[in-house]
Amino acid sequence: MQYVFNPERVCAKVFMIDIDENTRTIRDFESKGGCPGNLKAIARFTRGMHIDEVIDRLADMPICPASKVTSCPEQLRNGLIELRKKLDAGEAPVRPSFVLDSFSFGKM
């Protein structure tokens, strides 16, 4: 299942999280915008992890100097918390009818 989350107050514009609904493990994570090296590292580290473990590990992350309010790891954590609430309530997030390549955000 793919879950699309729009982070707030960071350079990244879209997070796409592919999870296994049964095991609640992250299969893949992609982003559009933001710091590509850092977000690709987050994707590699979170792949195969249970969403609860990622939520726990990303707690109390420092804020991004560019944002001065939040960070991409904190926004990913917020997205996973939102996703977990929907899964716990039995609500399947709406599957997106697009892929990230269809977005054009210009230069970041």
Image (cartoon, helix red, strand yellow):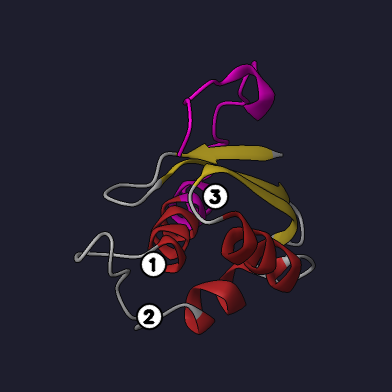
The span picked out in magenta is: 83-108
Above or below 24: residue 52 = below
* Residue 68 percent coordinates (x, y): 20, 66
Three-letter amino acid code at the position of disc 3: Leu
Mark 3 is surrounded, within 10 Å at the Cα level, by few (under 14), some (14 to 19) or many (20 or more) other residues, namely some
Question: In the image, is 32 to the left or to the right of 30?
Answer: left
At 28% from the left edge and 69% from the top edge, which residue is drawn?
65
Residue 101 magenta-drawn?
yes
Three-letter amino acid code at the position of disc 1: Glu
Three-letter amino acid code at the position of disc 2: Met
* Residue 59 percent coordinates (x, y): 40, 80
At 67% from the left edge and 38% from the top edge, which residue is drawn?
2
Mark closer to the chain start, 1 or 2: 2
Residue 100, picture quadrant: top right
Q: Verify CB contact (< 8 Å) between mark 3 and mark 2.
A: no
Residue located beneath label 2 in the image: 61
At 75% from the left edge and 67% from the top edge, which residue is drawn?
44
Mark closer to the chain start, 3 or 2: 2
Q: Verify CB contact (< 8 Å) between mark 1 and mark 3.
A: no
Mark closer to the chain start, 1 or 3: 1
Residue located beneath label 1 in the image: 74
In space, the residues marked 3 and 2 are separated at their CA atoms by: 24 Å
In space, the residues marked 1 and 3 are separated at their CA atoms by: 20 Å
Residue located beneath label 3 in the image: 87
